[in-house]
Image: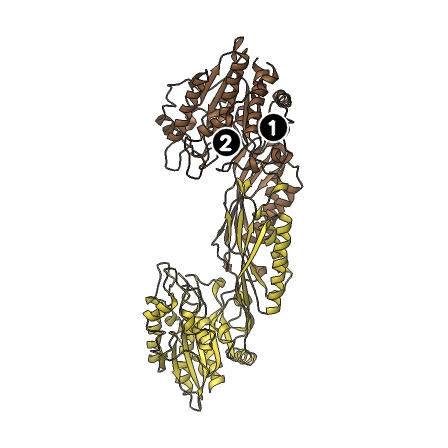
Chain colours: A brown, B yellow
C-alpha cells in the first residue's frame, strides 16, 4: 500500500461518532449505555449492521461481543483484532470506547477498499463491557475472550436493582449457547485506539500517543476510629481526632508520592466524616486511597509505605486504623514489537508519537495479558473523560484512524 | 448561717432532674425540648409551678424567661439571680441546663428554710433559650435581659419548617406585651451552675470547678476549589487537588495549635468532598474550623495564622481558597470578686475547687457582659454532653447545689 493513499483519505469518523451517540443519548448531551440495557443492545445491533454494510462478516459470541471479519487470503486463521467497547458510564461522553470500535471498522473498510483483501484475517470488535458501570465487574467482554472469565462468573455480580449479570445476558439472548463460546486462541495481535483521558498529548502538542504499558491499580479504604467529643471543652492533648490524623496521613502520603517516579499516581478522592458537625470532634473518618503505577514492584513498595504512614500517624494521634485493600489490578506491558510498529506507522502518518503509560484501565489491559497488544491514543481536550464534555477534533480522530489502518496494514498485508 | 446546716441537708436534686426529664423524654433515654415547642412550654410551666410550691413569687417576662423570686428584707431592689436554661439539643441529656435551673430553685428554697428571708432579693430563673437548636440564634433569653437582643430581632430567625422566632413566641403568648419587658437593670450578680461538659474535673478528681472565663469562639467555613480530574491519567505535578491541599492545611493548623497555650482549642469537625469518588481527583472541598480561647488577642492572632496557612498552602497547591467567618463570639471574663467568693464557698463545702476556662458557651457568657457573673461546674462523667449518656452522680450534684447556696448566702444575707 502506498502511504499517500491512506493519508489522502477522508474516513468520516466524526460523522460515525455522532451517529452512534444517538443510542442512549442523555439530556445533557452525553451518552448512557449500560451493559445489556436496551440502549446498549440497540447500539450493539446498529454496530453489527454497519459492519455488514462495510462488507464484513459479522457474528456475536455468547457474551455479546460482536465481530466484523475480513478473511485473510493466506493465513485466514491468524487474526489481527482491533476494537474497543461501546458501554459507557452514566452520562458519559461520545468518544470513550466508541471511537475505538468505529475506528477499527472504518480502518478495515478503508484497507479493504484501498488495498484489497489482507493475507491475515482482520477483525473489528465491539467488546461487550469495559467500564463496569452497571455490574461490579470490569473487562467482562475481553476477559471471556482470554479465559480470565467464564460464563460461571455471571451468577454473582448484580446491578443496583438486584438483576444478576447472568439474567441480564439472558434478556439479550446471550449466555445460553446460541452463539459460539467467547474463548479465543487465534488472535495474533490486538490493537485498540482510544482518547487519552489525560493531558499529555495536549500539553506536548502531539497527535498520537503510543501506550507502552497500562498502570496497575490498588485501591484502599482507610478507616480511622477516634473519640467523638466537644470541640470547646476537650483539651488538644486529650483528643483522639481521626480527621486531624487523616489529614496528616494524606499530607504525608502526598509528600511521599512526590518523591516517587513521575508515573506514580496517588489519589484520595473520597472522604466521609462522622458525625460531621463544625463544633464536634469527629469520632470516625473513612477515606479512599488509589495508587497506580506501571510496575508491580513500585506498587508493592508504595503499599508498604502506605501501611507504615497510616500506622505511625495513627499511633501518635491515638486513633485506631483499619486499611482495607478492596481492589488490586496488576500492571501490563504492551507488546514491544507492536509498539515499535505503531510508532513507525504514526511517523509515516506525519505524527511525532509520544510514549505514554496509561493510568486508566482499558480492554487492551485484559487482552494484553494473553495476546500481543498495543494501544494508540489521540488527544482529548482538557483531558476530560467520562463526561458529556469529551471532545477530540475531527482531524486528530482522522489521524488516529489512518495510523491504526497503517499498523493493521503492516501486520496483515 | 452555719455551714454545718448546709452540708447536712439532703437537697434531693437527683429526683428533680429525673422529674424534669419527663418533659420531652426521647425513646433513647434522652430529652428533646426545643425552644417554644409544646415540650419546652410544658416544662417551663412545670418549673413555674414548682417555684410556686417552693414559696417563690413567679413571673414570666415577655420572651418567656420564668423567674421565682424571694424578696429581700433590706435591699429588695438588688437582685442576686441564679439559673440556667431548660431547652436542649435534639436528643440531649437530662443535666445540661436543667441542673442549673433546678439547683437555683432548690438552693433558694433551702436558704429560705434554713436561714429565713435574705437581705437582698434572690431570684431563680429558667432562661428561655441557650442552645440555639431550633432557631439560628443563641442566648435569646439572656440576651433580652441584657439588651443585647430585643423583640425586633425575632422577625428574621426561622426554624427548619419556616416558622419565625416571632411566630413561635406568639404561639405561646410571648412577644405581645402580655408580660413585662425582659430588659433588666436590677441584677447585682448572676450565678450559674452547670455540668462541666469536659473531663478536667473528672481527671483531677475534684468536685467543683470555678469558671474564670468563657472562651471566645470563631467559626469558619473554608472552601477550596481545585480541578476535578481522572485519578489515573492526571500527573501528580499537574493536579489542583483540593483534598490534598485541605489535608496539608489541617495538618499545619494542628501543628500550629499545639504550639499555642493549652487553652486554645482548634477543631475541624466537618468536611465535604465533591464529587467524592475513589477514582476521581476532587474538584472542591469544604471544611469547618472552630477556634476557641479565653483571650481575644490570642483568637485574633490565630485568625491571622489561619488566613496565612490557608493562603500559602492554597497558592502552592494551585487551589482557590475562600474563608468565610460565620461566627464570632468574644470571650468573657467572670467577675473576680464573685469567683473568689465562690472558691471560698466551695472550700467550706469541703471541695478543693479547680479553676477552669469554659470552652463551651453558657448563658453566663451573655449575662456576664453586663452584670457581674460567675459559674460553678460539677463533673460530668467522661465529659459527655448533648447526649442521653450525660451523667453526674447524686453526691456531686448535691455538693454543687450546696456550694451554690453558700455563695448565694454570702451575697444576699
Which numbered disc covers residue A208?
1
Q: Nearer the viewer, residue A100 or A323?
A: A100
Q: Are marks 1 and 2 on the same chain?
A: yes
The chain holding disc 1 is A
Q: Residue furthest bottom?
A: B74
Q: How many marks?
A: 2
User: Which image quadrant is residue B40 in?
Assistant: bottom left
Q: What secondary structure is marked by label 1?
A: loop
| Residue B273 visible (yes or no) | yes
A110 above or below B335?
above
Q: Position of residue A35 (x, y in %)?
A: 42, 30
Q: Indicate left or right for A352 with B218 as reference.
A: right
B401 above or below B72?
above
Which numbered disc covers residue A95?
2
A24 above or below A259?
above
Q: Nearer the viewer, residue B45 or A311?
A: B45
Q: Position of residue A185 (x, y in %)?
A: 51, 16
Neighbours of disc 1 within 10 Å: few (<14), some (14-19), many (20+): many
Q: Indicate left or right for A306 with B151 as reference.
A: right
Neighbours of disc 2 within 10 Å: few (<14), some (14-19), many (20+): many
Which numbered disc covers residue A174?
none
| Residue B10 visible (yes or no) | no
Q: Nearer the viewer, residue B103 or A81?
A: A81
Q: What secondary structure is marked by label 2?
A: loop
Q: Earlier in the sequence, mark 1 or mark 2?
A: 2
Amino acid at each position: 500500500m502506498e502511504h499517500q493513499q491512506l493519508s489522502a483519505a477522508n474516513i468520516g469518523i466524526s460523522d460515525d461518532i455522532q451517529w452512534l451517540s444517538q443510542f442512549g443519548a442523555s439530556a445533557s448531551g452525553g451518552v448512557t449505555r449500560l451493559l445489556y440495557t436496551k440502549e446498549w443492545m440497540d447500539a450493539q445491533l446498529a454496530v453489527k449492521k454497519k459492519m455488514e454494510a462495510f462488507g464484513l462478516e459479522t457474528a456475536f459470541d455468547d457474551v455479546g461481543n460482536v465481530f466484523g471479519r475480513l478473511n485473510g487470503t493466506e493465513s485466514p486463521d491468524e487474526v489481527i483484532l482491533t476494537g474497543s467497547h461501546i458501554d459507557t458510564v452514566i452520562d458519559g461522553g461520545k468518544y470513550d470506547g466508541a471511537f475505538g470500535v468505529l475506528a477499527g471498522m472504518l480502518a478495515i473498510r478503508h484497507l479493504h477498499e484501498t488495498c484489497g483483501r489482507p493475507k491475515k484475517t482482520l477483525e473489528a470488535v465491539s467488546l461487550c463491557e469495559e467500564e463496569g458501570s452497571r455490574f461490579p465487574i470490569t473487562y467482562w467482554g475481553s476477559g471471556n475472550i482470554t479465559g480470565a472469565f467464564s460464563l460461571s462468573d455471571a451468577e454473582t455480580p448484580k446491578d443496583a436493582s438486584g438483576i444478576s449479570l447472568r439474567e441480564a445476558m439472558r434478556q439479550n439472548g446471550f449466555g445460553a449457547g446460541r452463539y459460539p463460546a467467547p474463548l479465543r486462541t487465534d488472535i495474533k495481535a490486538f490493537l485498540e485506539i482510544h482518547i487519552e483521558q489525560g493531558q499529555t498529548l495536549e500539553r506536548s502538542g502531539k497527535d498520537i500517543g503510543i501506550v507502552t504499558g497500562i498502570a496497575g491499580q490498588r485501591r484502599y479504604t482507610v478507616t480511622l476510629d477516634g473519640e467523638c467529643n466537644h470541640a470547646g471543652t476537650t483539651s488538644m492533648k486529650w483528643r483522639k481526632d481521626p480527621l486531624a490524623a487523616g489529614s496528616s496521613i494524606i499530607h504525608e502520603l502526598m509528600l511521599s508520592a512526590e518523591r516517587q517516579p513521575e508515573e506514580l499516581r496517588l489519589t484520595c478522592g473520597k472522604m466521609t466524616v462522622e458525625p460531621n458537625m463544625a463544633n464536634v470532634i469527629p469520632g470516625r473518618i473513612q477515606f479512599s486511597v488509589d495508587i497506580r503505577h506501571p510496575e508491580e514492584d513500585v506498587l508493592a513498595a508504595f503499599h508498604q509505605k502506605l501501611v507504615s504512614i497510616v500506622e505511625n500517624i495513627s499511633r501518635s494521634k491515638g486513633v485506631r486504623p483499619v486499611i482495607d485493600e478492596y481492589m488490586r489490578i496488576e500492571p501490563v506491558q504492551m507488546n514491544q514489537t507492536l509498539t515499535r510498529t505503531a510508532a513507525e506507522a504514526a511517523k509515516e502518518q506525519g505524527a511525532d508519537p509520544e510514549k505514554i503509560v496509561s493510568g486508566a484501565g482499558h480492554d487492551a489491559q485484559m487482552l494484553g495479558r494473553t495476546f500481543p497488544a498495543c494501544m494508540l491514543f489521540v488527544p482529548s481536550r482538557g483531558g476530560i473523560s467520562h463526561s458529556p464534555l469529551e471532545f477530540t477534533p475531527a482531524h486528530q480522530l482522522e489521524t488516529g484512524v489512518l495510523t491504526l489502518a497503517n499498523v493493521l496494514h503492516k501486520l496483515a498485508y
